[in-house]
Amino acid sequence: MDTDVSQVGWIPVALNNAVQAGSAIRVIAGTDDIALWRGKDGVAHAWENRCPHRGMRLSYGTVCGNRLRCLYHGWIYDGSGTCVAIPAHPDLTPPQTIKVRTYRCVEAGALIWISDEDNSAPAIDGHWTPCRSLHIEVAMPDLPEILKWTKVNSVRPLSTYAADVALPDQGRLILAVHPMGSKGAMLHCALPASARRDSLLSASHWLGELRSRIEQAAVV
Amino acid sequence: MKLYDYVLSGNCYKIRLLLGFLDLDYEKRPVDFFPGREHKSDAFLKINPLGQIPVLEDGEIRIRDAQAILIYLASRYDKSGEWFPGQSHSQIAEVAQWLAFSDMITSTASAARLHDMLGYNLDIDAARAGAHRLLRVLEDHLAHQEFDGHDWLAGRRPTIADISCFPYVALAEDGGIDLFCYPAILRWIRRFTALDGFHSMPGINVSP
């Protein structure tokens, strides 16, 4: 599925515990390759996964304080994506034009969301805790398609890619999907913050079974 | 102690890791695995008739198989008893189960890496698909361990189970196996590389 991030609004690309303060990970959203990282201050950033210098994936980079340092030649970018230091030219103040392409990035409902658009972020009530993110081999068109594979009592859409759902056995949870082009999709699940071990485990099994049903149907 | 070693071998890396965690002195005897295929030479087959590395020699004792060497080193030299916990029968079995699992990772993820890095002729699609099936099992287990407040494969502390699974999981991308869809595995890799006494090898990207 060729999903252009610029046309689809906010995409949930990870649970909030997928990237810890002071680290960087790689996520795919539609056809975009993205470096998702947190400074020591805990603020999440989503950038094009490509150093403007030589194209190295920035997700291999090192977080230094609240800046990201490219693995390859050590170019350092501040939180806005602007290059602030080039180690091979220590006396040079890098021109402001050396800048990484950035996405808007917010956290809500234990999920990290990214967008290219200037619209308002998803409004999600209450406090939530991350449960599981599962890779699914088939590219899923949308959430309603996925929900056809399970019993639900109620669905309150949060965006194109996420809904607050109530299930007969699991109770209330946030179910999100994010398409990754030729690499399938991720299913993300968050539970109310009061959830303890047994609820998390139960929801994890439910999500795994949901994935199995969808993947097996796609093979047939 | 002498380790028959190859710098790019994940199985040799397992032994270097535990020797590092236990802070033991040893001698490295490099084996020209590629391109020399020294491990298949007549001379080396007298050391290990299976033609595989690593091999460990400790005095009169000679041991082949990475997992067997891990058991030997942990049970003989780890005074804390934590790397191969022997108190509970179920935990011994749990560790053994992951040691066996790590051999399955070797036959899939490591095979894919040998194909991509050294040009081995094998069914690369089958190797990658097999690795992903195993990584799903590992991902589920690690996520469920986290629900119990446990960071490691077999309990609250890292054991030789973690050491035996770590190298070829962390090196999987060398074989074209994406890890970005396994967040619990990525968290476990990050915790592992932050352990006291951890040593890296080429291909392991360590975050400070």
Image (cartoon, coloured by chain):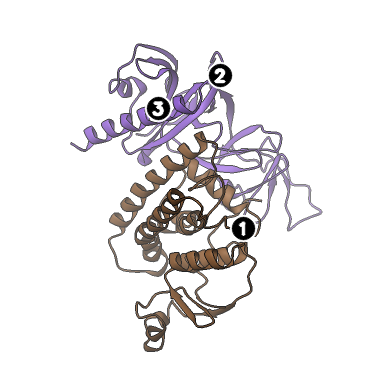
Chain colours: A purple, B brown
CA distance separating discs 3 and 2: 30 Å
The circle drawn on residue A202 is: 3
The residue identified by callout 1 is B80
Type of amino acid at the residue the image marks with label 3:
Ser
Q: Secondary structure at mark 2?
A: loop
Residue A27 percent location from the top left of the image: 49, 39
Q: Which residue is mark 2?
A: A121
Nearest the viewer among A93 and A187 is: A187
Q: Residue at x 62, y 40 (%)?
A: A100
Query: Few, some or many C-alpha atoms within 10 Å of disc 3 (few <14, some 14-19, many ≥20)?
Result: few
Q: Chain of mark 1?
A: B
Label 1 packing within 10 angstroms: few (<14), some (14-19), many (20+): few
- Mark toward the viewer: 1 or 2: 1
Q: Residue at x 39, y 47 (%)?
A: B135
Which mark's residue is nearer the viewer, 3 or 1?
1
Q: Chain of mark 3?
A: A
- The quadrant where residue A162 appears: top left
Q: Position of residue B148 (x, y in %)?
A: 51, 35
